[in-house]
Image: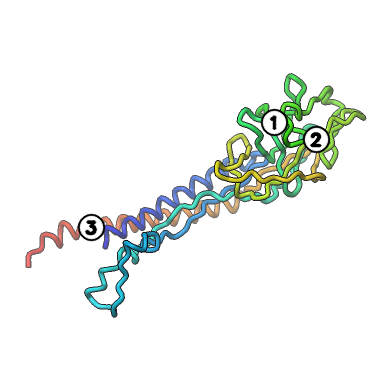
């Protein structure tokens, strides 16, 4: 019994360790524009329910001493890590006064061209590269609205003079009186189908169907950036709670270890 119990406690400790890593990453990105907080998701893994029906022999007779031990592991459960859930709620807007900074309000993602294909981001702290293109802080071209089947190279935004640049609240880019196009903003039909790829970019999961829709009239704020939606107080509270649970699982592991030690070195040496 103690040998089985230690694995239950160990699975709990491993789960809390993963949760601590996720919380630490959230806190580290509290000042990252467009960052969305993550949260670990756990389920209870019921041993008997996860086995094929042909291998389970549940007692069909009235409870007795003979049938008590024939549980096939059904009396044990473990913590099962289901992955990471991303919270896409709106972050606060911070005024920068930079005409190249744009913040999205509500749903949507900017389209960005990368060497690995089109990616999506909420970080609107854009800049202009040496060729006069509107790019992300990592140098990836920001795309303008157009035919989705058109090559991304033909949808880049060319800026001649950033001093006269103006972006409307609907994403229309003007250089003086001249319109340079409209920043492409799309909506992901199923947010659970995308995953983080680093550099504040998102891409579709390998087995997910890439379903998107174009937002014709997005709500934007020029001269602002959307900040992280991480609540430091909440994250610190969760970290303290998770740390305490982790300590409790460690105590349980030590208790089971002590039971096993007595079973081997004390009970095992007792003569009757």
Q: Is residue 85 above or below residue 140?
A: below
x, y percentage for residue 200? 63, 37
In this rendered view, identify the residue nearer to me: 45 or 165: 45
Q: Secondary structure at mark 2?
A: loop
| Residue lying at 38% horizontally and 54% vertically, measured from the top left | 11
Q: Which mark is residue 91?
A: none
Could you tell me if residue 231 is visible in this image? no
Q: Residues within 10 Å of mark 3 (few under 14, many from 20)?
A: some
Q: Is residue 6 above or below residue 272?
A: above
Mark before the other along the chain sequence, 1 or 2 = 2
Mark before the other along the chain sequence, 1 or 3 = 1
Frontmost of labels 1 and 3 is: 1
Left or right of 55 on screen, residue 158? right
Frontmost of labels 1 and 2 is: 1
Q: Residues within 10 Å of mark 2 (few under 14, many from 20)?
A: few
x, y percentage for residue 40? 52, 51
x, y percentage for residue 50? 39, 59
Between the residue at mark 1 and the residue at mark 2, the CA separation in whole angstroms equals 17 Å
State the quadrant of the N terminus: bottom left
x, y percentage for residue 271? 7, 64
Left or right of 252 on screen, residue 128? right
Q: How many marks?
A: 3
Left or right of 119 on screen, residue 132? right
Between the residue at mark 3 and the residue at mark 2, the CA separation in whole angstroms equals 65 Å
Could you tell me if residue 151 is visible in this image? yes
| Residue lying at 63% horizontally and 37% vertically, measured from the top left | 201
């Amino acid at each position: 019994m103690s040998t089985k119990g230690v694995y239950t406690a160990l699975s709990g400790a491993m789960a809390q360790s993963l949760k601590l890593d996720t919380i630490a990453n959230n806190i580290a990105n509290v000042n990252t524009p467009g960052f969305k907080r993550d949260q670990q998701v756990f389920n209870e893994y019921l041993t008997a329910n996860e086995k094929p029906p042909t291998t389970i022999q549940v007692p069909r007779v009235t409870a007795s001493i003979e049938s008590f031990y024939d549980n096939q592991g059904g009396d044990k459960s473990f913590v099962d890590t289901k992955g990471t859930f991303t919270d896409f709620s709106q972050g606060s807007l911070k005024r920068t006064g930079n005409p190249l900074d744009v913040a999205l309000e509500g749903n949507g993602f900017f389209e960005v061209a990368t060497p690995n294909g089109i990616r999506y981001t909420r970080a609107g702290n854009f800049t202009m590269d040496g060729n006069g293109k509107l790019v992300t802080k990592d140098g990836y071209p920001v795309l303008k609205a157009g035919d989705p089947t058109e090559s991304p190279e033909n949808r880049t935004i060319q800026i001649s003079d950033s001093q006269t640049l103006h972006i409307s609240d609907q994403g229309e880019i003007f250089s003086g009186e001249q319109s340079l196009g409209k920043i492409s903003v799309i909506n992901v039909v199923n947010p659970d189908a995308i995953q983080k790829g680093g550099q504040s970019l998102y891409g579709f999961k390998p087995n997910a169907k890439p379903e998107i829709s174009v937002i014709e009239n997005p709500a934007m704020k020029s001269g602002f950036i959307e900040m992280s939606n991480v609540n430091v107080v909440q994250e610190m509270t969760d970290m303290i709670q998770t740390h305490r649970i982790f300590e409790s699982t460690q105590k349980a592991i030590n208790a089971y270890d002590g039971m096993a030690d007595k079973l081997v070195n004390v009970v095992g040496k007792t003569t009757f």
